[in-house]
Amino acid sequence: MAVLVIADHDGSTVRDTTHKTVTAAQALGGDVDVLVVGSGAKSAADTAATIAGVRKVLLAESGELGHTLAEAVTATVVGLASGYDAILAPASMDGKNYMPRIAAKLDVAPISDIMEVVSADTFVRPIYAGNALETIQTSDAKKVITVRPTAFAPAAEGGSAPVETVTGTDGGKAAFVGEEMVKSDRPELGAAKIVVSGGRALGSAEEFHAVIEPLADKLGAAVGASRAAVDAGYAPNDYQVGQTGKVVAPALYIAVGISGAIQHLAGMKDSKVIVAINKDADAPIFQVADYGIVGDYKTIVPELMSALG
């Protein structure tokens, strides 16, 4: 069996999600190759080559691939698909965009968000906002799979795979127009070891920034938010943690003023240690919390800040 992993990278280095997807790919058995698509991404390809267990790294570059244009990525991957039995990518924003397109082009059923590889054709994935796990078996000769990175350990370093250049394909009628990037000195939410999240109980965008961000900065943490807080305009969309936001599993997750709706729990309940601060003792968040503090965040968070020094 030959498996192709589409790397998640920032142009200069591959993200931790790539290492975890390689772990899932190795569980399928056979040879594992990594595809790095982009523009000026040779450094990322060189980083991918150091992942242990990778046979070779394929580098495909073009202007459209530099913006991860889904149509361009799809065309490039489909052009390489004949040499592989399975194609895997992290279940990131980009992966969720182009992987269903790849599956459609290959006329197979996509398998999304897997948490476990049982065998080469059998996988476990969450359903009902993570409240149940589904074991599925596919008869498709070629598998197109997105991987939930938080469910897998990262592959080790120490590899020395060769890097080969392949042809990148453009996006056809689709063209990149522009983007607005949020710049922050804080860790990226999906990869942070500590996350501080705020909910609707904070009451306003000003209160959210005044309470959550100083605590996050004190801990060197990323900032997250519940869907209710995002919908209310307290925080931008890329802060959202949950089923329709980002799935995180940091070493420490602090939830301030978050009730713990099923949608939110689906995105953070695999965190190693969960601390919940909420004045409602019956809030569902306490059912998954390792440490729960019942009280007003306006009192508790300043006390926590003081204790941290």
Image (spheres, helix red, strand yellow):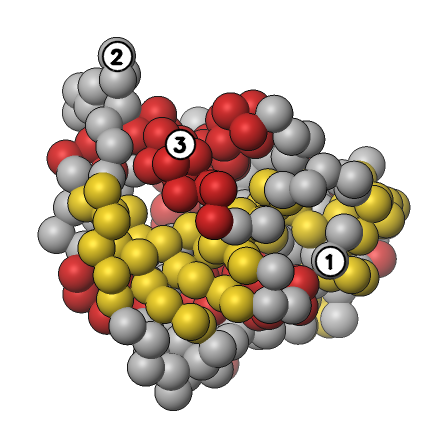
Residue located 69% across and 51% down the image: 114
The type of residue carrying mark 3 is Thr
In this rendering, would 166 be left or right of 19?
left
Residue 176 at x, y = what percent?
A: 20, 23
Residue 214 at x, y = what percent?
A: 36, 61
In this rendering, would 226 be left or right of 51?
right
Q: Can you name the residue that lies furthest to the bottom here?
A: 158
Q: Secondary structure at mark 1?
A: loop
Residue located 73% across and 71% down the image: 291
Q: Which is more toward the observer, 15 or 98?
A: 98
Q: Earlier in the sequence, mark 2 or mark 1?
A: 1
Q: Secondary structure at mark 3?
A: helix
Alpha-carbon distance for marks 2 and 1?
36 Å
| Residue 116 in view, yes or no | no
Q: Which residue is mark 2?
A: 173
Residue 307 at x, y = what percent?
A: 49, 81
The type of residue carrying mark 2 is Lys
Q: Which residue is mark 3?
A: 74
Residue located 68% across and 42% down the image: 141
In this rendering, would 218 be left or right of 21?
left
The type of residue carrying mark 1 is Ala
Q: Earlier in the sequence, mark 2 or mark 3?
A: 3
Q: Which is more toward the observer, 199 or 186?
A: 186
Alpha-carbon distance for marks 3 and 1?
23 Å
Query: What is the number of the mark on residue 120?
Result: 1
Specify few, some or many for label 1: CA neighbours under 10 Å numbering under 14, 14-19, or 20 or more: some
Could you tell me which quadrant the N terminus lies in? bottom right
Q: Are marks 2 and 3 in contact (CB under 8 Å)?
A: no
Specify few, some or many for label 2: CA neighbours under 10 Å numbering under 14, 14-19, or 20 or more: few
In this rendering, would 230 be left or right of 271?
left
